[in-house]
Image: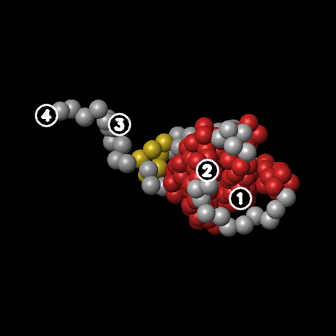
Amino acid sequence: MTKSWITTKDGDKGTTSLGNGTRVPKDHPRVNLYGTIDECQAAIGLARASCCTEGIREELLRIENDMGSVMGYLALFPGIPEPDPATLEEIVEKVHAILGETFRFVRPGDSLPGAALHLARTIARRAERLAVALHRDGDIGDAPYAWINRLSDAIYALSLWTDKINRECEENR
């Protein structure tokens, strides 16, 4: 018989520890929320790795760094401040100023990094839906909820900017 390389702690029974030491089920709404943000961060990392524009890469890295803090906050690690939704609003405003156009519905897939950002946006929307119940029950405050709510908007704005840059590159080839 082959021994499994996967091990669990004695008595684990499908639980995990939050940052404050509290044990909760692995399907706890808080764990689902920060796990979904983790998925979103991975998709943003894919976009950043495939993006050829330094300014966009910098904004994506900024969001990724903030996401790490947000996940720590949601996981109840002591000393991590509430996220500030103004950082995401700044990104939306910056992109709006660059593009000079009204945001519109688009079909994902105009570029690899843009498609990765659309994937991230849909994951962010799922995180937002998960956050609703936690916010309604008072388990997360207004600022973290607003940050999660604005995340998909910032990602969408960056996807539009990314696709525009890629279209311009293709036209100049």
The amino acid type, in three-letter code, at marker 4 is Met
The image quarter containing residue 50 is top right
Q: Earlier in the sequence, mark 3 or mark 4?
A: 4
Residue at 86% x, 54% y is: 97
Residue at 21% x, 32% y is: 3
SS assignment at label 2: loop
Residue of label 4 = 1
Which numbered disc covers residue 9? 3
Mark 4 surroundings within 10 Å by alpha-carbon count, few (fewer than 14), some (14 through 19), many (20 or more): few
The image quarter containing residue 147 is bottom right
SS assignment at label 4: loop
On screen, residue 45 versus residue 172, left or right, reads left
For discs 1 and 4, the disc positioned in front in the rendered view: 1
Distance of label 4 from label 2 (alpha carbons): 48 Å
The amino acid type, in three-letter code, at marker 1 is Asp
Distance of label 1 from label 2 (alpha carbons): 19 Å
Residue 71 on image: x %, y %: 61, 45
Residue of label 2 = 111
Distance of label 2 from label 3 (alpha carbons): 44 Å
Residue 48 on image: x %, y %: 64, 40
Position of 14 relative to 108 (above/below): above
Residue of label 1 = 153
Residue 54 on image: x %, y %: 74, 36
The amino acid type, in three-letter code, at marker 2 is Ser
Residue at 52% x, 57% y is: 29
Whether residue 1 is visible here, answered yes or no, is yes
For discs 3 and 4, the disc positioned in front in the rendered view: 4
Q: Earlier in the sequence, mark 2 or mark 3?
A: 3
Q: Earlier in the sequence, mark 1 or mark 4?
A: 4
